[in-house]
Image (spheres, rainbow, N blue to C red):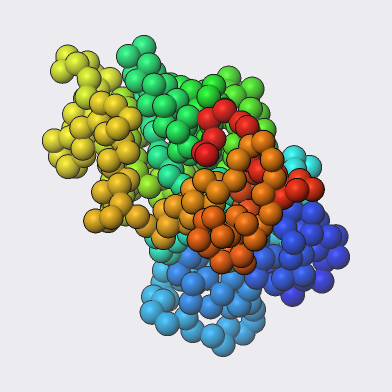
Amino acid sequence: MIDALLSDAELRAAVDDVHPSGDDPETIARIAWSVLAEPGDGVAGTLIGELGAAEALRFVFGEPRTLVPPGRESRTLAEGISRWSARADPRSVRRAVTDARDVSARLIVPGDPEWPMALDDLGAHTPVLLWVRGRPSLLRRGPRVAIVGARAASAYGEMVAAELAGDLAASGAVIVSGGAYGIDGAAHRAALAVDGATVAFLAGGVDRAYPQGHQQLLRRIADTGAVVSEVPCGVAPTKWRFLSRNRLIAALGQATVVVEAGWRSGSLNTAGHAASLGRPLGAVPGPVTSAASAGCHRLLREYDARCVTNTAEVRELWESLSPDGETAENVIDAEQVRLLDAIGTRSGVPLVEIARRAGLAPDRVRALLGVLELEGIVEQTAAGWKKKPTRGRRG
């Protein structure tokens, strides 16, 4: 199958429009795997991890199969091959790319500068790729906090979600959620209201607004933030895809906060993923008589979640990741803060002078400026670099 795809000139040209590697067998193979396998397919993920995406396709669809992946139980692999073969149509792979191109979606694969390494913690369940409408760089910008909760939220829940998300976004945090009604929507809207950054993970393709009532909201997120999915355009959201999508929200967030949730709320699924990944978990308490907060109280009692009542307590969650409160990505974020402290909004500063003020190597400053320029935080002028005076962004 991979050889047929590589010889498809129309496909390679379309891939060039969504990713700068149209002739790369691994990229094309990952697109094929996103069509063949359901999100979070651990058998496919293990096979790709052991052989690489292109070689895994050759193994599955080549005859005879001369490769034996280490540690693969034959029956499990046979079942996987059976379900993948039912979708093995090169036209579907081509359509996944052309449909993404039609809505100006970008393709992100592991190894790309924008790839969120936080998702690699999912192991065999790491997505093979991501389709993004908007700003892929937000997937690596920190700090990131996932705010989730009930669809049928109360006025209290939506108010708390909006206050937390708005305050955090205004101070530079990226708000991550699922684009649904209730708590998700309140968090996204609050971030947008302060010109902050927000990321929405969808259970269907990025070309399908779901729920329909959030079509305008998701369009606004795509304009200034990022709308993300691991399934191709045109794919419909389903119950199991929502549950699988939740692992991405939990993995991307450096902390997860459940604002309001019933006893069996899907938000508890996201919280479970966060806990299993070792991500800090917070829950907002509600009235003890409220069924809408029963899930949050369950998290506090059974999942060792931290009680969260304000933005300062949310910040304490991700600051508890290590003794000094820093992960590898937070180190990058700290360097960006030093760089932004070295420039202003009125006049441009030459790169060499920025390096001197920030105490960073010129090559490092050049790389960081490139990222910040993509995020719309800085701009280059004839005199040098300066910050864009945009409300709600860092610096």
Q: Position of residue 53 (x, y in %)?
A: 59, 71
Camera-side residue of 130 and 70: 130
54 up-or-down from 382: above or below: below
Q: Residue furthest top?
A: 155
Camera-side residue of 202 and 172: 172
Q: Residue furthest bottom?
A: 66
Camera-side residue of 284 and 144: 144
Q: Left or right: 232 with respect to 49?
A: right
Q: Position of residue 59 (x, y in %)?
A: 58, 78
For the N terminus, the image quarter is: bottom right
Is residue 193 visible to us here?
yes
Tell how many labels. Answer: 0
Q: Residue at x 24, y 56 (%)?
A: 323
Q: Left or right: 62 with respect to 99?
A: left
Q: Position of residue 150 (x, y in %)?
A: 36, 25
Q: Residue at x 44, y 52 (%)?
A: 334
Q: Position of residue 77 (x, y in %)?
A: 46, 71
Q: Left or right: 201 with respect to 207?
A: left
194 up-or-down from 116: above or below: above
Q: Quadrant of residue 285?
A: top left
Q: Left or right: 20 with respect to 248?
A: right
Q: Residue at x 76, y 58 (%)?
A: 15
390 up-or-down from 132: above or below: above
Is residue 30 visible to us here?
no
Q: Residue at x 15, y 39 (%)?
A: 302
